[in-house]
Image (cartoon, grey):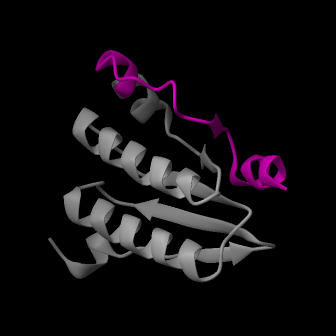
Amino acid sequence: MSVDDARVVLQSVGGILLVPLHGPVHEELLSNLGESLLGYLQRQGARGVVLDMAGVEVLDADDFEGLRRVVESAMLMGAPVVFAEIRPGVAAGLTMLDVDDTWVRAVRTVEQAIALLR
C-alpha cells in the first residue's frame, strides 16, 4: 500500500471541513482519517464535516463500520457529518450487504452538503 493510498486531505470551506476520500478505503486510511479529523476538530473546530465519497469505488461492511466510528467521534466533538457523492455502485453494494446505514446523513453533491451544514 502506498503512502498516497492512506493520505487524508482536510480543506476548510467557510468553517466547514471538506474531506475528499480517494481510492480504496482500508484500515490505514481510516486510522489516518480519524487521527487527522479529530486532531483538526480539537485544535480549530468546524461547523460540520463533509465526507466527499466521489473517489471511492468500493466499500465493504468492515470499512463502512470504520467510517461509522470516525463519524460518531466527530459528532461527539460537535461536528455533524454529511456524506456526499456516494457512487451508485457503492450504495448498491452496501444495500446488498444489508449494513446498518441509519446513522448516515447523505446528500447527492458536495454543494448540497455544504449548504445543509451552513
* Percent x, y of residue 31: 28, 65
Question: Looking at this view, is 91 or 74 the one in front?
Answer: 74
Provide the residue span drawn in magenta: 94-118
Expressed as whole percent of the image width and height from the top left, the position of residue 25 reads 30, 54
Q: Residue 33 vs residue 97: left or right?
A: right
Classify 27 as above or below 65: below
Tell which residue pokes out farthest to the left in this image: 1
Residue 44 lies left or right of residue 25; in this view the side is right
Q: Is residue 23 magenta?
A: no
Residue 109 to residue 28: above or below = above
| Residue for point 38% across, 47% down | 69
- Whole-percent x, y for residue 113 in the image: 73, 49
Residue 43 position in % (x across, y down): 58, 83
Q: Quick check: 24 left or right of 87?
A: left
Residue at position x 28%, y 44% in the image? 63
Left or right of 108, for residue 65: left
The reply to whether the magenta stretch includes residue 97 is: yes
Quadrant in the rendering for residue 118: bottom right
**Total number of numbered labels?**
0
| The N terminus: image quadrant | bottom left
Q: Is residue 75 above or below residue 46?
A: above
Q: Quadrant of residue 47?
A: bottom right
Among the 4 quarters of the image, the one containing residue 92: top left
Q: Which one is nearer the viewer's eye here, 97 or 56?
A: 97
**Image point (65%, 50%), residue name:** 80
